[in-house]
Image (spheres, helix red, strand yellow):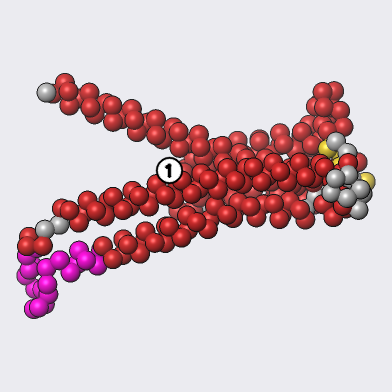
Amino acid sequence: MSVFTHLVAELGRLLEPVLAQSATAAAIVLFTVLVRLALHPLSRAAFRGATPAAGCLPLLLQLPVFFVMYQAFSSSKVGGEANELLGHRLFAAPLGSRWTEALGEGGPFGAQGLVFLGLFGAIAVVAAWSAVRGRKAAAAAAASASAATSAGRGKAKPGAAKTKPGAKPGTKPGVKAGVVAEVTAEQQEVMRKLGGVLPLLSFGTLITAAVVPLAAGLYLLTTTAWSVAERIWLQHRKERAERAEKAGRTEQVEQMA
């Protein structure tokens, strides 16, 4: 933890000529960005679905960082010495203070309370942004699955199935296709339900930010905003690549014709 404290303190000193007393808060944001940049290859692999574990690794690897951030702004001493980070502020609010402490220093609209309200408002905007994107992605995935199922049913002809050698007597053609259709319908229902619930989990960050030190809340805001923006950018690149591939295939067909 002392290494982290030293790193954030040094970053804060570099930014202090420009940002004055809020330099350490900016250093936390910069530190979070550096962490997310280091994890970007894993996030990209998770987006592509390269491995099942890839989607969990970025989150799991951030947990120790968040824990160190929490401890650094909750402990009065680091390495046997006074914790210098606790004296730094974001505007009027100490980075080690919590929402409950801010309420006791002038209420929700006091100098410290307004800083926390600004943080909560920013987190709420990011969470709403994430929820909207999540609902759209879930709806698109459900529509794609429904279209694939409809196409499969259209290709299947009831009279085309033949009894394979060794099949049990009385087996009716099309039963297997019906089972597949039923499973697909169940999957579509699960996707629909998850699409309505999972985006709402983004607002859980608000609850966490209300009980952790202000510095940890800044980390949550930055990493959540990064996650949403990163996913939008990766989706944009994917769609652009698909359009380019489709345009290339169309050009080949026109040349052959």
- Main secondary structure type of the part rendered in magenta: loop
Task: Residue 2: give x, y in percent of width and height.
Answer: 81, 45
**Span highlighted in magenta in the image:** 161-180
**Residue 117 located left or right of residue 101:** left
Name above or below for residue 65 compared with residue 24.
below
Location of residue 90 in the rendering, given as x and y in whole percent from the top left corner: 83, 38
- Residue visible at 65% across and 55% down in the picture: 204
**Which one is nearer the viewer's eye here, 15 or 125?**
125
Q: Does the magenta stretch include residue 69?
A: no
Residue 256 vertical position relative to residue 28 in the rendered view, above or below? above
Q: Residue at x 61, y 39 (%)?
A: 226
Queried whether the magenta region covers residue 165, the answer comes back as: yes
Say which amino acid is labelled 1.
Arg
Image: 231 above or below 71: above
| Residue at horizontal 79 percent and vertical 37 percent from the top | 25
Q: Where is residue 58 in the image (x, y as percent from the top left)?
A: 57, 47
Which quadrant of the figure has residue 115?
top right
Closer-to-camera residue (147/97): 147
